[in-house]
Image (cartoon, helix red, strand yellow):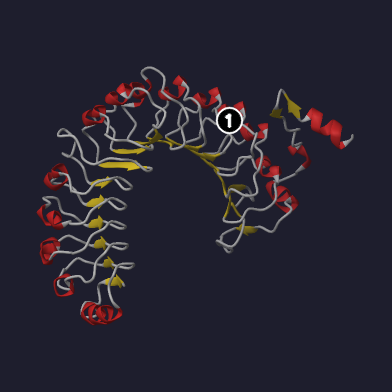
């Protein structure tokens, strides 16, 4: 058959259609492995997997239960999908891209799928609905716009991460026992009615792109959510509906935005981590300072000049990040945070020195980054001498 004719048979209505893999040609899992066009480590208890290349783990019956590749991927070898005893398949590389055959549905024992190399123009086949033991799906496809409806048949699915410009999320997904939902490149303008309400009993982590959303009312039902990351651009104010998500422990806004403050009712009662980088803050919001559980604060790439108020924080701060601001001085009173503070990032500011004599006394401090400031070489020598008095501090000058 000519290449032209093969191309016609492999595309129907613009969609790639793969021929059958004919898995019956392989007499065993080892036969599949030996057919692969690249070197692979076979871990059988005496030989272990390494990070250098593809690896397959086999059990005492010579069945492959774990197959993974990371870093630089090998050429496409779809016979991997003939390994029907797999409990985990991880193709954790983005180049070269691999297509997904219908035989994916034959991996009925698989519990975790990591498919970070989905070929452009290729979709996840509907046969994925046969994977009734699937608990985790991590997929990356930069032309993937929809998920198969049959995914709703995977009743054990608890972790779903899809890095793709999905145009919509099917209502049927909301009836899965999802605990973690990551759709950070979501290209839709809304979610189905009651989508989050249905997920609320189980959903604890949500990462979603909201840049095209017209209304945020549906988020108000996420009363059990603990981790929320909103990806967007140009946001001037955090929508007030998120004030009702009071169980939040970790709240993040990513992308380049224009936030300058938080609303009076911003939920801080349970807040442990807050990341609001790439915004226009020039003062630390009082809600942050009054948060009694806050341990990690990320305010890099804002417009701070003075952060002396940070010592008034009521929370047990352990990780503070103010990289790439315009901070000119670090107050000596920073030592008040000495009982809890472990990491302090002040790189990319306008500091000419820091109170090293106070910092070196801080009992918990382990990492200090003050690179890319205005500190002279002579001052760096002086600071280095002082910091060396505390061998527990890793410092970057």
Picture quadrant of residue 397 = bottom left
Q: Is residue 45 placed above or below 112 in the rendered structure?
A: below
Q: Where does label 1 land, which residue?
A: 128
Query: In the picture provided, is 298 more to the left or to the right than 129?
Result: left
Measured as percent of width and height from the top left, residue 280 is found at 27, 45
Image coordinates of residue 194 in percent, x first then y, are: 36, 18
Asked if 94 appears above or below 164 in the picture, the reply is below
Residue 56 lies, in percent from the top left, at 61, 53
Question: Which element type, helix, strand or loop, lies under badge 1?
Answer: helix
From this viewpoint, which residue is outermost toward the top? 193
- For the image shown, how many numbered marks are present on the structure? 1
Picture quadrant where residue 175 is located: top left
Q: Residue furthest right?
A: 1
| Camera-side residue of 30 and 17 | 17
Q: Quadrant of the N terminus?
A: top right
Q: Residue at x 18, y 57 (%)?
A: 306
* Front one among 295 and 300: 300
């Amino acid at each position: 058959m000519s290449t032209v004719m093969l191309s016609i048979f492999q595309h129907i209505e613009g969609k790639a259609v793969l021929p059958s893999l004919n898995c019956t040609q392989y007499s065993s899992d080892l036969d599949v492995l030996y057919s692969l066009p690249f070197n692979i480590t076979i871990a059988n208890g005496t030989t272990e997997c390494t990070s250098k290349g593809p690896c397959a783990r086999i059990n005492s019956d010579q069945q492959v239960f774990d197959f993974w590749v990371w870093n630089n991927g090998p050429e496409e070898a779809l016979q991997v999908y003939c390994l029907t005893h797999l409990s985990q398949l991880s193709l954790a590389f983005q180049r070269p891209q691999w297509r997904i055959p219908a035989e994916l549905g034959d991996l009925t024992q698989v519990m975790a799928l990591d498919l970070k190399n989905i070929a452009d123009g290729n979709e996840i086949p509907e046969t994925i609905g046969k994977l009734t033991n699937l608990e985790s799906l991590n997929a990356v496809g930069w032309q993937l716009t929809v998920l198969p409806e049959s995914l709703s048949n995977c009743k054990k699915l608890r972790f779903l991460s899809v890095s793709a410009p999905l145009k919509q999320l099917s209502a049927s997904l909301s009836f899965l026992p999802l605990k973690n939902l990551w759709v950070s490149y979501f290209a839709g303008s809304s979610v189905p009615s009651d989508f989050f309400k249905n997920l609320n009993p189980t959903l604890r982590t949500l990462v979603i792109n909201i840049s095209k959303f017209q209304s945020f009312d549906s988020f108000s039902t996420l009363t059990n959510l603990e981790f929320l990351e909103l990806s967007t651009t140009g946001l001037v104010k955090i929508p007030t509906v998120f004030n009702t998500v009071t169980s939040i422990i970790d709240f993040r806004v990513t992308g380049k935005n224009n936030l300058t403050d938080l609303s009076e009712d911003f939920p801080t009662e349970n807040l442990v981590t807050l990341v609001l980088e790439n915004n226009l803050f020039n003062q630390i919001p009082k809600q942050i300072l009054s948060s009694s559980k806050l341990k990690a604060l990320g305010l890099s790439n804002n417009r701070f000049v003075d952060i002396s108020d940070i010592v008034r924080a009521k929370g047990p701060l352990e990780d503070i990040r103010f990289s790439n601001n315009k901070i000119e001085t670090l107050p000596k009173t920073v030592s008040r945070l000495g009982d809890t503070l472990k990491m302090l990032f002040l790189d990319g500011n306008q500091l000419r020195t820091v109170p090293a004599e106070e910092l070196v006394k801080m009992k918990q401090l382990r990492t200090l980054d003050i690179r890319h400031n205005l500190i002279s070489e002579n001052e760096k020598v002086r600071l280095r001498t002082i910091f060396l008095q505390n061998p527990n501090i890793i410092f970057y000058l």
